[in-house]
Amino acid sequence: MIVPGATWDGRVTRFAVWSANARAIEVELGHEGGVLRLALRPGRDGWWVGETTDAPPGTRYGFRAHGPFDPAHGHYFNPAKLLLDPLARLIDGPIAWHEALRTVRDPRARVLEPDPRDSAPFLPRAVVVAPAAAPAEPALRTHWCDTVVYECHVRGLTMRHPDVPPAHRGTYLGLAAEPVIAHLRSLGVTAVQLMPVQHHAQDEHVARLGRPNYWGYAPVGFCAPDGRYATAPGRQVEEFRAMVRALHAAGIEVLLDVVFNHTGEGALDGPGVSLRGLDNRGYYRHVGDAPLRYEDVTGCGNTLDFRVPAVRALTLAALRTWVVEFGVDGFRFDLAPALGRGDAAFEAEAPFFDELRADPVLRGVKLIAEPWDLGPGGYVLGRFPHEWTEWNGRYRDTVRRFWRGAGGVADLATRLAGSSDLFEGSRAPQAGINFVTCHDGFTLRDLVSYERKHNEANGEGNRDGSDHNESRNWGVEGPTAARHVLDMRARTMRAFVATLACSLGVPMLAHGDEVGRTQRGNNNPWCQDSPLTWVPWEPPEADLDFLAFTRYAFALRHRLHAFRRRSFLPRDEGAGAAARWLRADGTPMTPEDWADPDRRTLLLLLALRRDARAGAPGESEARALLLGLNGGSRAVPVQLPDGHDRGGWHVLLESAHPARHGAEVHWPFALPAHGVALLAHR
């Protein structure tokens, strides 16, 4: 069996790389005495292989590929360009833009010619890495119904943390620091989802802006931990492994946001540092019979071609490396429909999904799809195979609209109940990742503080970023000292968190939202590596009252089986039903009520089974729960249905007035304006 990349067995290092159209491939090995070149031999199915005893761990290497330079047929072989191993475990430096990284001399010329400059002085090297001394710890396998995801950026999470040693801030070891882990545990987080840590490239566009690619959605090393997050050059492999061990010891899974839909080589005018030089026609999708044009369904200049078996093999090999050698528990796939596209449309039965399902290493790891790309029919939420979980953009948009004051509750009820319209059938509520905010778009504080994007700092004239934010500033755009505006913003933020905690499905928090992080209205800070994107940890910037509320809401979720159930709510609306949607007067919702575009109040009465009560710590005394959401501007008096016991009710959670937690309920109960209330019957 061919193992892609460079693997050392204690004596021999074996190299394997795929190219269906190359005529020759060499490995250029760096030694103190100069450069050694190893000619690879052609193997089966386009794989080139070779082995040597002259490349022990620590050896720096790159590829040079020989073949036709024939743009009309999609070939850009250029042996003047040193190329990175796409499956290197370690890359020894950043990829900063330089003109010599171009594959072609002038991408705007009518006749394309190869660029003759040697790119080696401007490109880092892959490094041979010894296998881990001990196998990675087994995955934690936390069930999806018990999972709380925390999306974070390795650098941004800890750069300003006062209790992380200065040398570790912004690094893998900083994320693994005890104060950070204690914070995550206090929120009830069971899995961190790390924004891209695959080694990435900087393209000409970023360089001209004079800014970094902070987010890192431009991979060139698919299983190489990014060296930006190491405490010293070359330490990223061992420090990433140490981070995973520390998080696992705390019961926290590690999920990676991985990018396999495109690479950091971008369009033809981008750097040719790996796949373009190894086999441009073989790795990338092209438009019909026009190899000069990439089929770009990613918005990033190129799209990997998952119709090609070798592309799928490369991806599966990278995923196995993260699991076996680094101990990763799962993956969130950026622009995942691109991985399942046939000749045009997305296919839920695509070969990649079948091969992933059948892989003995990857079977059972957590799989999360970002279920949209820019191609035809690219929004495919709810259509991924049954073992996948998907980012639920419908949840985000519906909940945002409700809390900014838009009327109508039918879609809100569906989202609260786990989005059965999207996932019912062979799947459960846990097929959806519920979120209000993520790295892309406004932070939670900005969602209640800005109605327009403010991306001027990105250097693109405020043209970048989405104009569709479903936000509300409550009277003032941006910062203000007006007490009534600040109170409304704080109240709405608590309503968002309470809604997320009381919804069926898998909740996800974006880092720093729990302490009120702001990006000052920038909803696309992909190129901002500064306090603008770093989490504030100390007052006056950190909102400690909101942090306490968030901790309380998710601790309550952990106690309540009703919001972590593995099946959708029953549809029976009778008086004895386990779940009943009610009007404020306690009577059942009617079809007219569901269709009312101005309705802003929604009630859900849940009767708890005895086995559910006994199985949930802290819930054993609760016979029923009443969840109420009021998106209107006035409090609404709420009644129980006729015949229901009105004694023994108390407030579990009230987002508008957190001080009322635990208070006894008197009927009618005043459901506060712009608020969520959860009542329990003992």
Image (cartoon, rainbow, N blue to C red):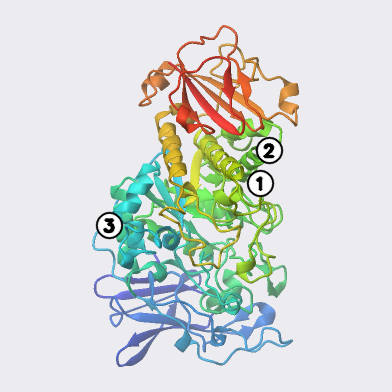
Which residue position is annotated with label 2? 405
- Specify which label sits upstream in the sequence, 1 or 2: 2
Residue 385 found in image quarter: top right
From what the image shows, is residue 392 above or below residue 50?
above
In the rendered image, residue 370, in percent from the top left (x then y), is placed at 57, 52
Which residue position is annotated with label 3? 135
Look at label 3 and name its amino acid. Answer: Pro
Which residue position is annotated with label 1? 472
Residue 591 found in image quarter: top right
Q: Nearer the viewer, residue 238 or 667?
A: 667
User: Disc 3 and disc 1: Cα gap in Å?
Assistant: 50 Å
From what the image shows, is residue 23 above or below residue 511?
below
Q: State which quarter of the image contains the C terminus.
A: top left
Q: Is residue 317 visible?
A: no
Please tell me whether mark 2 sits on a helix, a strand or a loop.
loop
User: Disc 3 and disc 2: Cα gap in Å?
Assistant: 52 Å
Residue at 40%, 30% in the rendered image:
559
Disc 3 or disc 1, which is closer to the eye?
1
